Amino acid sequence: MAREPFPQLEKFRADLERCTKCGFCMSSCPIYQEERLESSVARGKIMLIRELLAGNLSLSNGMADKLNRCTLCRTCAQNCPAQTEVPAVITAARADKVAKKGLSFPYSFIFRWLLPRRRLFGRTVRLFSWLERLLFPRASGTLRHLPFFLTALGKGRHIPQVAPEFLRESVPEVSPPPQGVPVRYTVGYFSGCMTDFVFPGLGKKIISFLNRQGVTVILPESQGCCGAPVFLGAGDLATGRRLADANARAFEGLDYVITDCATCASAMKDYPRFLADTKEREESYRSFAMKIRDITEFLVDIMKLPPEAFRASPEFHGKTVTWHEPCHLGRYLGVKEQPRRILKALKDIKYVEMPEADRCCGMAGTFSIHFYELSRKIAAKKVAAITATGADIVVTGCPGCQVQLADSLALQGSNTRVMHIMELLE
Amino acid sequence: MIEKPIIDELCRIAGRENVLTAKEELTAYSYDATNLWRHLPDAVVLPHTSEEVARILRLASEKRIPLTPRGGGTNVSGGSIPVRGGIVLVTTRMNRIIEVNRTNLSATVEPGVVLQDFQAALAREGLFFPPDPQSFAGCTMGGVVAENSGGPSCLKYGVTKQYVLGLEVVTADGRILKLGGVTPKNRTGYELMMLFVGSEGTLGVITKINLRVLPAPKASQTIVAVFGDVATAGETVTDIIASSILPAKVEFVDNWTFDKFRGLLPDSSLKRAQGILLIQVDGLPETVAAEAKEVVRLCQRRASEVRVAQDKAEADRYWQARKAHFSDISSRAPTIVNEDVCVPREHIAEFIRLSQERARYYDVPLSFAGHVGDGNFHPVVLTDSRNREHYTRAVKCVEEIIDIALSLGGVLSGEHGIGLEKQRFLKKAMDPAAIELMKKIKDVLDPHHILNPGKIWED
């Protein structure tokens, strides 16, 4: 078999060769824990990719399936004594696969065409939310059993309703602090798709919290999807670049870009590594990446807010709260202490650390669409950990995790509420 | 190639979802943690019960299909590589911890339980299982028994064979044998169970394991000592052992992997140093304090820097650095030749000196690390198998290091086993009559030689 070129994988050849197959990645891999197959785990995937490059394996459907069976949770890389950046290798392999084989429908349509067009994307979401209201009866609370607009995404998931009014429709592009509060910072707010379309209340809460702390919040109209499902999930680098360029431009001239979504934040920090194909892009992506801060990181590390600045909203007083650490927040951005500092500062709630709080919830975006059953099994372990704490509320730092946790808890009949950490605050 | 009717039969036995034949799946079972050996199996089967294992073995025996048992596949001997093709029988889906019994101080597990998961389950009960091979995060209990695994803690606590109370084993003809039990003493007939401990998958497939476990030590203390040369570190080990203190672990790494200790120890002392000893004493808090003090005093005689970890977090950082050694050294050269000799403790320093002298003679980089407290070394020669001339010198050097160990009364393999990696040395490391006897035992238990063929001795 003639050797095919794999341009993206070539960039990570050093990582590919670093693996010594020692097996440190095995017991903590969420996929391996469920499947118990060598091809599930980092070591096996690395070997398959080496064989792909050597021309001994081809990009068969089976091989693509193996590459897709990874939540990119980065636990393997964290445990790797050789510091092999396995998620980067897998991402590169997916990109090479898409370059050769293309994306299948409906992903090709959604990723290439819909996601880069924020306005149209919003309207499509709205259209589907009307359809969903016509076709399905309203369920109690904010959770409903409905097929979400991304066709295959539903599969019987309990997912949140699309909001009647999107964030960008309900707040101005510039939100200054209230009268009498001096301006300490001016920051850009990257509101990911989930906050914009599904959790606009979270976005409003963040803006008003920041305003009261003396922060002017700018929500640029021209920002778009972070691109995580496009270039990290599906390996579509070309569309990824269009999104990255738009976002980098939208926040030009600002010192900080805050996010409430760990996945968006880490994806945007990954622009230089995966998407920079020219010197200009490299520079633009790098300077953009340096501005990005998770909201908790900004409040604790940059603003250095004292513990008294954080108060739980009265409706949550007396509640027991636990923290789920998103993979993208802890293992990608290294934000581990900041959210816990905030939770510990809240006097009127009881904060309990859950066992293995940093374990992947199994969402991983499109992963959970491709492998819903597997995703559910991974989530079941997370649910058990949450239940073990006896918490009334589980908070996290990633709307993606929120969807997964809410779905999994509901499936198991739990009454534990799922919220973003910022929603707890007054 | 295995014919389709046989694959169909495997599917009937284990279920279609537990039989793999796709090229990418087979590829994932063509290697272990060694770097030169590779061979594709024709099929992979992942049974869930002893009965399924028995039916698979009966089928393989009838059809004379080579069958290689495999757990996590983290071994470093080539032992789980299906060099004759055929079936790889993977035990990772037989992964129930059946019982942890605090009153009996025993535990019963299936072979596919990962050692780290087993340790976690024991820790919840205040218990522990001492063998701690570096592959703990991936290796499975069946492999731990079949390789008679060791690790750092074996200095004080002994190796796996000292903890096996009972086994369920399926022989090549598909008989399910129950050997031993759960009691710490058992004098019933021959110690047949011990035949399978360290058998490297050549005599049967282990399907259930009863283990002796211990109460976890109440306290421990970690001491780090930095030495100006490798041999004085060796002498310090001899001093410690001779002082009637038995630490749980005495580990050694040389300056090839000091990178992992940067930030943990001052650069100034690492700069001049050649070796680091990591020592852990454990037991009751009072004993630990007294022993740690004595170990520090003994180290200070020769060490340039001695530190006692102030808390568990600091101790963990040192042990993490130690655990990273193998990967670190493996990444330093395209090919590494990793040995596993064990020498009597009185000869530790002499072994190091003689080995270093051979490395200088052959002009090849040699790194030492290992469980020096029990005389078990992992000398690593760094080379590149694509450079024939260098590689030949490296291999010669390794052979002579093995000769040195044997001449000092040591053994060829302390804990990795023979597998493929060391089979060419077996003849000089073992009594020929004993090799003959092993072969006869093999003939009795596996007359058609289907089980892990091509391993331990050269045909």
Image (cartoon, coloured by chain):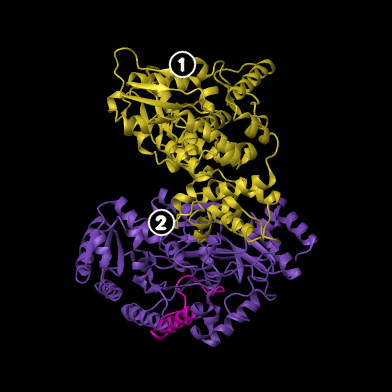
Q: Residue furthest right?
A: B5
Q: Residues within 10 Å of mark 1 (few under 14, many from 20)?
A: some
Q: Amino acid at mark 2?
A: Phe
The percent coordinates of residue B371 (x first, y second) are: 37, 69
> Circle 1 marks a residue in which chain?
A
Which image quarter is the N terminus of chain B in? Answer: bottom right
The residue at which mark 2 appears reads as B128
Left or right, residue B301 beside residue B209: left
Which image quarter is the C terminus of chain B in? Answer: bottom right
The residue at which mark 1 appears reads as A172
Range drawn in magenta:
B393-422
Colour seen for chain A = yellow
- The number of discs equals 2
> Circle 2 marks a residue in which chain?
B
The residue drawn where x is 70% and y is 75% is B448
* Secondary-structure class at tag 1: loop
Q: Which mark is residue B181?
A: none
